[in-house]
Image: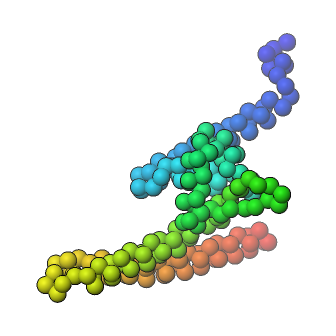
Amino acid sequence: MNARDDQRPDADADDAVDAREQARRQFAEDLSFIWEMAGTSRMDGRVLGYLMITDKPYLSSAQIAKALHASAGSVSMATRRLMDTRFIRRHSVPGDRAHYFMAEDDPWGSFLANEQRYFDREIEVIDKALTQLAPEESAAQTRLTNGRDYLNWVMDHHHKMLAEWNEHKRARDAAAAEEADG
């Protein structure tokens, strides 16, 4: 009798599940490094990455924390930030007090939309600062005006990019449906 005969019949299936789970965690880690390089919380990237790659419709905070070997507090802070930026959303289960979360289907489109909120706030701050300057403070006026106008210019491009992205998704989905039909 060889060593393989001693294993449970479903051991290979368990190994495959473990390998997929390890791949999910690795994806979350890889995404977290990218987020950290962009100046965002690594934990935000880990949580988003894990929610994006799971095929479960939603996960509880506790499930996320366990999967990522993270504290409940760090997961809680990350989920709040990710909800605020519209990368994820909360899901409620009737009769269950736990917090459940799911990734948005298009977090990248949400990224463009959310950046707009950031730009709006920054433009508001710049506009307020411009009203505080004396007429002779021309260098500061130039810098602030350039900043405000740049942000407005970028926002115009965001509108165009978001519209183009939505059109791209529509065309992609239509082509996939056509291919599936015929």
| Displayed quadrant of residue 79 | bottom right
Q: Residue at x 26, y 82 (%)?
A: 132
Left or right relative to 33: residue 7: right
Q: Residue at x 86, y 28 (%)?
A: 9
Q: Number of labelled discs? A: 0
Image location (x, y in percent) of residue 86: 58, 67
Q: Can residue 163 be seen in this view?
A: yes
Please, is residue 29 above or below residue 177 in the view? Answer: above
Left or right relative to 27: residue 148: left
Q: Residue furthest top?
A: 1
Quadrant, the C terminus:
bottom right
Please, is residue 177 above or below residue 98 in the view? Answer: below
Q: Which residue lies furthest to the left in this view?
A: 136
Please, is residue 109 above or below residue 14 in the view? Answer: below
Image location (x, y in percent) of residue 72: 62, 45
Query: Depth check: 176 or 169 in front?
Result: 169
Q: Which residue is drawn at 65% across and 63% down?
A: 89
Left or right relative to 21: residue 127: left
Q: Which residue is drawn at 22% across and 82% down?
A: 133
Image location (x, y in percent) of residue 105: 65, 65
Q: Is residue 34 visible?
A: no
Image location (x, y in percent) of residue 120: 43, 78
Query: Depth check: 110 or 101 in front?
Result: 101
